[in-house]
Amino acid sequence: MNREIFSDATLVVLGHGTTLNENSALPVRQHAAELRRRGIFAEVREAFWKQEPQVKQVLAEIKSPRVFIVPLFISEGYFASEVIPRELGFAGCPATLNSQLSTLNYCSPVGTHERMTDVILARAREVVEKFPFPRAPKPKDITLFIAGHGTERNEKSRRSIERQVELIRGKQIYADVHAVFMEEDPRIAEVYSLATTRNVVVVPFFISDGLHVVEDIPVLLGEPERIVKERHAHGQPTWRNPSEKHDKLVWYSPAVGSEPLMADVILERVREAATRLASAPAKSQSVT
C-alpha cells in the first residue's frame, strides 16, 4: 500500500468496548498500535462504543480531511450495521458523510472480510503447533469448529461464520469444518457428536478474549465451571491444550480478533472504502 495515499487521512479503529472486562479493548489497541507503527496514516486513533474514548468524542477531535472508521466487529450484526451507523449519522454500512472539516467513511466490519479465512486458519494451525501431543496431528485428521455467539436478534449475526465454513471446506484442508454457536443451533456442546475425527480444533470467532471466550465456551466444551473460574482468577489458561473429552482430543485457540493478521484486514477495509469513494463521489451524503 502506497503510504502517500493515506498520508492525509486518520484511521479510527472502532471497538464495542465494555466496562466489565478490561481485555475487551486489547485487540483494538493492539492493531491500532501496529498500524501506527507502519506510518501509513497521518494518525491512528482507538475508539469505542461502550467505553472511553468514545467514538463521537474521538471524531470531534480529528482535523484530517479524510477519516476511515473501521469497526472491529465480527459480523454485520445489530451494533455494527444498525446502532452505530445510525447514531453517527450514516445511512448504513458502508457509507460516507461529507462534513465541513472531513469526509467520514464508515467501513464494513472486519469479520465479514474474506481474508478472515487466513486469520482462522492461522489460529487453528498455531494452537496445534504450539501444543503438540504427542505430536501435532495433520489437518486431514482434524475436525475444525468455528465457534460464534449467535443471536436471534439479527439473522446476519451468523452469516460471516457460515461463509467462513464454506470457504475453508472448499480448501479441503481439514477432515471437516463446522459452525457452532452459544445461543443458536448447532450448539457448541455438540462438537463431540459432530466431529468425524478424534482430533478437534475449536477457534472462537470473537474479537477479544473476553468472558465468553475464556469462561463460557470452555464450560460449554465440558470443563467444570468451578475449575474454569479458579484458573481465570489465578491468571491461568482456562483450557488446557489439548484436553481429552468424550474420547476426543480438543485444542482451543485464542479469539481471532487478536491474531496479528487482523491489522491487514483493517487495511483492506480502508482500501475498499477509498476505492468506493473515488469511483462514486456523487453518492456521498452531506451534513453540516
Image (cartoon, grey):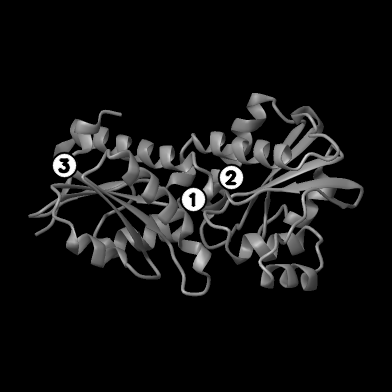
Q: Which residue is mark 3?
A: 8
The quarter of the picture where residue 219 lies is bottom right
State the quadrant of the C terminus.
bottom left
Amino acid on which disc 2 is placed = Ile
Q: Answer with mark 2 or mark 1, whichever residue precedes in sequence.
A: 1
Q: State left or right for residue 195 relative to residue 170.
A: right
Q: State left or right for residue 181 relative to residue 278.
A: right
Q: Which mark is residue 75?
A: 1
Q: Nearer the viewer, residue 198 or 184?
A: 198
Q: Answer with mark 2 or mark 3, whichever residue precedes in sequence.
A: 3
Amino acid on which disc 1 is placed = Ser
Q: Nearer the viewer, mark 2 or mark 3?
A: 3
Is residue 129 positioned above or below 14 on the image? Answer: above
Q: Answer with mark 1 or mark 3, whichever residue precedes in sequence.
A: 3
Q: Marks 2/1: CA distance?
A: 8 Å
User: Where does the image place residue 115, in percent across and percent down from the top left?
Assistant: 49, 34
Check whether the beta carbons of the residues at disc 2 and disc 1 lie within 8 A of each other. yes
Q: Which mark is residue 161?
A: 2
